[in-house]
Amino acid sequence: MKFQLLFSALALATATAPLHADVVFMRGYTNLSNNTHTTMYWWNTIQGQATAATSSALDSLAFTATSFAADYYFTDGTNYYRTSQTQSGINEIRSFGSSLTNLLANNHIASYSLSQTFSTNDDFWADSEGNFYRNNSNSGSPSVVKYTSLANLLANVGTGFSYGVTYGAGDTFWSYGGKFYRTNTNNGNVTGIAEYASFQALLNRQVTTTYNANGSEKDVFMTIPTPGAIALLGLAAFVSRRRR
């Protein structure tokens, strides 16, 4: 199998992407048979991410994690994070720094204890403007807490907002460049991805576009910048291959 530098591939994708020329859309798949995440893939459009169309993979490093049902992977556009939990709930945030290599190999560089233990159903995510979020998701997601820094998330010092509706407990949220995204889930499956123009639009349930989607609700979704943030994120060393 022939390999090529991901940097070159992403540069080409950036030149041809019709929707978001400054980002790529990433997705880590789930192997339900052994409770692990598998290879992370990338697309140059959200439609590709949603429908899992033919894509390019980020190397063949094992992207694995046990107890993934209660682990949330997210990025603030620079650094990557993962929640960690005990039997009682989520009690720690692990940082992989700005290296996607660390994330895929599950090699965290720092661990931060949360000031309290949160439900394993609480969804953690971040945007690229320095904010972090936690959905109160025990029976869905009627509300969200917004934190202005990682330190505030760890200390649980934030501002609560109501969605005015209960989202599915399996829905996943992420953000980049002021836009927000949410998966629609049904019986453990992703059926669509909703795009919102702003955080307020998300709160008001004002969907800009909904993309048909498929896959497991436990898949990992991220949006990250393309060149010139590639060097910062450590992606230049990765190779890609066509998914078969």
Image (cartoon, rainbow, N blue to C red):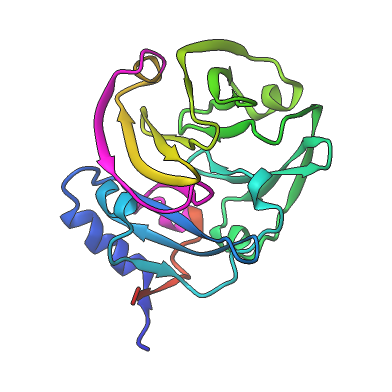
Where is residue 27 drawn, in percent x and y? 44, 54
* 100 part of magenta stretch: no
* Residue name at image x 49 percent, y 37 percent: 172
Up-down relation of residue 224 to residue 101 (above or below): above
Up-down relation of residue 53 to residue 129 (above or below): below
| Range of magenta residues | 203-232
Image quadrant where one finds the N terminus: bottom left
Where is residue 37 drawn, in percent x and y? 58, 60
Q: Is residue 212 left or right of residue 65?
A: left
Image quadrant where one finds the C terminus: bottom left
Q: Is residue 26 left or right of residue 36?
A: left
Q: Which quadrant would residue 149 be assigned to in this image?
A: top right
Q: Which quadrant would residue 56 be assigned to in this image?
A: bottom left
* 211 part of magenta stretch: yes
Q: Which quadrant would residue 5 be assigned to in this image?
A: bottom left
- Judged from this view, the residue extending furthest toward the front is 187
* Residue name at image x 31 percent, y 61 percent: 10
Up-down relation of residue 161 to residue 9 (above or below): above
Where is residue 231 drawn, in percent x and y? 45, 58
* Residue name at image x 65 percent, y 52 percent: 68
- Judged from this view, the residue extending furthest toward the bottom is 1
Where is residue 205 drawn, in percent x and y? 35, 18
* Residue 174 or residue 51, whichever sits in front: 51
* Residue name at image x 23 percent, y 46 percent: 21
Q: How many marks?
A: 0
Up-down relation of residue 197 to residue 182 (above or below): above
Q: Is residue 155 left or right of residue 102?
A: right
